[in-house]
Amino acid sequence: MTTPNQSAPTLDADRQRRIALLALCLAGFVIQLDVTIINVAVPTIQHEFHATTGVLEWIISGYALGLAALIPLMGALGDRLGHRCVLLAGLIVFGLCSAAAALAPKPEVLIGARVGQGVGGAAILALTLAVLADTYPPEQRGHAIGWWAAIGGIGFGAGPVVGGLILSVFGWSTIFWVNVPIILATVALILLTVPIAAATSQPRPLDVPGVVLASAGLASVTFGLITVTDVPWDAARTLVPLGVGGLALTAFMQWQRRADDPLVPRDVRDNSAFIGACAIYFLSYVAFSGTLYYVTLMFQNLLGWSALRTGLSWLLMNIPFLLAAQMAGKLGQRFTPRAIVTTGCAGGAVGVAALSTLTPTTPFAVAGVGYLVSGVGFGLLVPGITSVAMRDVARPVAGAASAMLNSSRQLGTAVGLALVGALGAAATQHSWGSSRHRATHTITTGNLHGVPPRLQATASNSFEIGYHVALGICVVSLLVAVWLSVHVFKQCKAPTEAADAEEPSP
């Protein structure tokens, strides 16, 4: 097999790379699928296990906690032991834990299996980009990243659709069994197409204090953000974990400046384009996850849509996302990263702004326009950010860089669901507070079941206020991302411009 540095790969090498890309896309798809597919099965699981709200919360959130806590470790292990090796181990763990979740006899086992899925998923998230960088030469990487981002995004949106279709015929355990054949196919394709290669001939020492501080900080912050929607700003369950996590991450950053072999290598940490890409990734996923969360509440709880119908409506976002992500790879050969990412962030802001105007009486065409425009925007910015972040990263530290980039996305998702959700809920409750029924009816999710008929209109209006506040925050987050893109990527050139600049003058 030819190496990524060769300029004229054979047809067989091209085909091998395409098959490897398919495997990496499947890995990204199944990880994102499991983020949302669980939601439609929660009522069935609750009924079968007679589970409490707290147990259900952990069935959903245990996966996110495992992901957030171990991404840094998996990236470091990939650089030390080999990207392919650790990625395969993560896929196998994810597949085994999916089977364990499907066979779980009680909720405690299911929670443990979900955390285990997160552990395997952390390796997958941390190293798919590193393996992609190993497989593709820089001039072809943008197109490949476009496919990877698009298929992963489709997995996120497909969760409710696939889950709704499965649950209409089979039991809840099938949503976990569906992972197993995808994982088996992915493992087989990677074994066939991705060559065995050590990350470096002189692997970096493992930064144990850095791993412990980063993992503890991310796990603690994620735990606090997970519980903030259930018990907003409760001292024991939210403020203490958030404070501990913040201290751990601060200590981690201080340690990285002093460590001889830091978890985040200095050449990655000093790369302003990479750091800017992480910040934009974080902000864009705050907006993306917060928007989907509140739009789903609007359609399902306030308008009474089924999970399947809501999921199908996301196709209006997923299809343009897929098309735009493919365009981003080609546009990256002609336009600067700043132009692509800024356009994507601005498009996302416009689309989310359109969605923020929704009310129960708004024609669906308005939501359709919001879906389409935001789909194009996110389809441009996600592969654009990923490409500019990874294009100058040296192979021996690609795992650490990929892990840091995906940690920013995972943390952005947690913040989007928790902080945006908490602020929207606070606005709803503030509006609803004048009602004497506030103590007996919680309407922060838009579920008006049990609210007296004479207060239905008031409750609906209160939720709408919270909805508008939450999506307004998402728009602001994307506008900040626009500002960052304009200022951080000033020096980043398109590949054709960079090639011209390197050619000597005649």
Image (cartoon, rainbow, N blue to C red):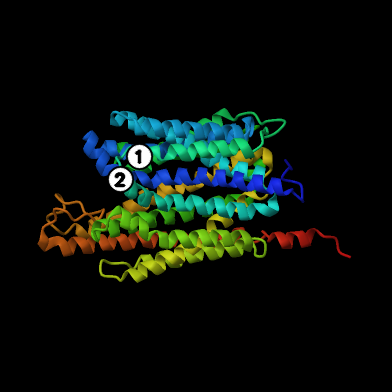
Q: Quadrant of the C terminus?
A: bottom right
* Front in this rendered view, residue 149 or 75: 149
- Determine if residue 193 is in view: yes
Residue holding disc 2: 167
Q: Gap between marks 1 and 2, in whole Å? A: 8 Å
The numbered mark, 1 or 2, whose residue comes first in the sequence reads 2
Identity of the residue drawn at 69% across and 43% down: 394
Residue 25 position (above or below residue 122): below
Helix, strand or loop for disc 1:
helix
Q: Horizontal and vertical percent for residue 296?
A: 32, 56
The amino acid type, in three-letter code, at marker 1 is: Thr
Q: Horizontal and vertical percent for residue 61?
A: 36, 40
* Horizontal side of residue 83 vs 454, given as left or right: right
The quarter of the displayed image where residue 423 is located: bottom left
Q: Quadrant of the N terminus?
A: top right
How many numbered badges does the structure rendering display? 2
* Horizontal side of residue 194 vs 477, given as left or right: right
The quarter of the displayed image where residue 488 is located: bottom right
Residue holding disc 1: 174
The amino acid type, in three-letter code, at marker 2 is: Leu
The crowding category of the residue bearing disc 1, from other C-alpha atoms within 10 Å (few below 14, some 14 to 19, many at least 20), is some
Q: Are marks 1 and 2 in contact (CB under 8 Å)?
A: yes
Identity of the residue drawn at 30% across and 42% down: 170
- Determine if residue 264 is in view: no
Residue 227: image tag: none
* Horizontal side of residue 461 vs 243, given as left or right: left
Helix, strand or loop for disc 2:
helix
Q: Horizontal and vertical percent for residue 26?
A: 51, 45
The residue furthest right is: 506
The crowding category of the residue bearing disc 2, from other C-alpha atoms within 10 Å (few below 14, some 14 to 19, many at least 20), is some
